[in-house]
Image: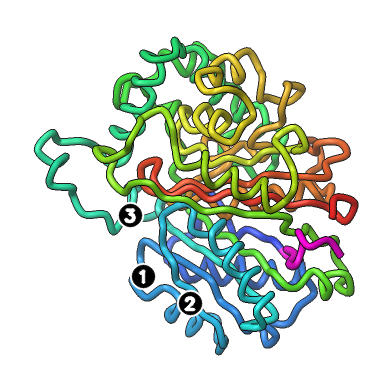
Amino acid sequence: MSPHATAAVVGVAESDLGEVAPGLTPLDLAGQAAARALADAGIRKSEVDGLFTASSYLPMAAMDTAEYLGIRPRHLDGTNIGGSSFVSHLLHAATAIERGQCTTALIVYGSTQRSDGGRLVSPSRPDPYEAPYGPRYPITMYALAAARHMYQYGTTREQLADVAVAAREWAQLNPAAFERKPLTREDVLTSRMISDPLTVRDCCLVTDGGGALVVTSAERARDLPGTPAYLLGAGEAVWHRNISRMPDLTVTAATDSGRRAFAAAGLTPADIDVVELYDAFTINPVLFLEDLGFCAKGEGGAFVADGGIAPGGRLPVNTNGGGLSYGHPGMYGIFTVIEAVRQLRGDCGERQVSGARTALAHGNGGVLSSQVTAILGTEAAV
């Protein structure tokens, strides 16, 4: 067994997605996803002894979720660092399993953001240094990063639009995606401006949804009925909370999280077959592809242009359609891992990346704040 693979994801699932039936709560969706992921793994709920979760709705999410699910875990983790929380939980779960703190970890999330009126549910408080300027949280912050990248490196609106177009092309291959209608570069550029330079089509969807992962030891995973995806390496990093304290609007802490993940896995960006990024806005993949080492700083715009990350492009990115077209229920990170695992299993139908042995899942939280990178692989990559 490779020293880079002590844990594996053995079950993944989503809840009902998009716009769910009235009356369902975030915990209901978390419960749906958990039941489906456990069934996918072939593991009984009674075997779960580690619970990892985060929520914008529940300040004590770990306790509320354990109570709702009817489990009594001996290891709890309610770390909330925004949308990257669940990629972080994957690393934390692997560490807990390796140290004997639990044997079977459930990572779970649920949100009814769309049913709740489509507004971002966030525990964030206005920053006293930013509030006087009236920013719209969080899009104003991402618009600042986009504008700076365009000014500093010549990135164009057309290149940002191509990120949205690529996501839609992947979504058209995914029956579960919320938005599958054709989308052109011109559609993105001429849609309603939200925060200059970002239009509404540069922004993620607002959907309901939940997701779950089941994680256990790599040794045990081999005895389970499904195909495991092994965690080869992961890294976390945080440089700031509020955008006004971000050291450089064009460089994120993904430079650190990615470097740590690749070092742990003993791999380089050239070894990765499929990439799942947190694309809350079209600027995100541009920044993360640069910071994770898939292209040089300032070259992200050219990298994504003209179908570079679309089906048939130079690198498969956000193969489920991403937050821009698949779904985005407030905190998206868990879905990057779900899709990475499915790609490694070969379960993705029309959107399957042929021969995928390695996948990178990357989470982003806050306003380009927390960055977490996980690298997973098949048995052949271990």
**Segment colored magenta:** 1-11
Q: Residues within 10 Å of mark 2 (few under 14, many from 20)?
A: many
Helix, strand or loop at mark 1: loop
Residue type at tag 2: Thr
Name the residue tied to disc 2: 65
Left or right: residue 245 compared with residue 13: left
Whether residue 82 appears in magenta in the rendering, the answer is: no
Q: Position of residue 62 (x, y in %)?
A: 45, 76
- C-alpha span from label 1 to label 2: 9 Å
Q: Nearest the camera: 309 or 378?
A: 378
- Residue 328 in view: yes
Residue type at tag 3: Val
Left or right: residue 53 compared with residue 212: left
The numbered dot on residue 295 is none
Name the residue tied to disc 3: 121
Q: Residues within 10 Å of mark 1 (few under 14, many from 20)?
A: some
- C-alpha span from label 3 to label 2: 18 Å
Q: Position of residue 378 (x, y in %)?
A: 84, 53
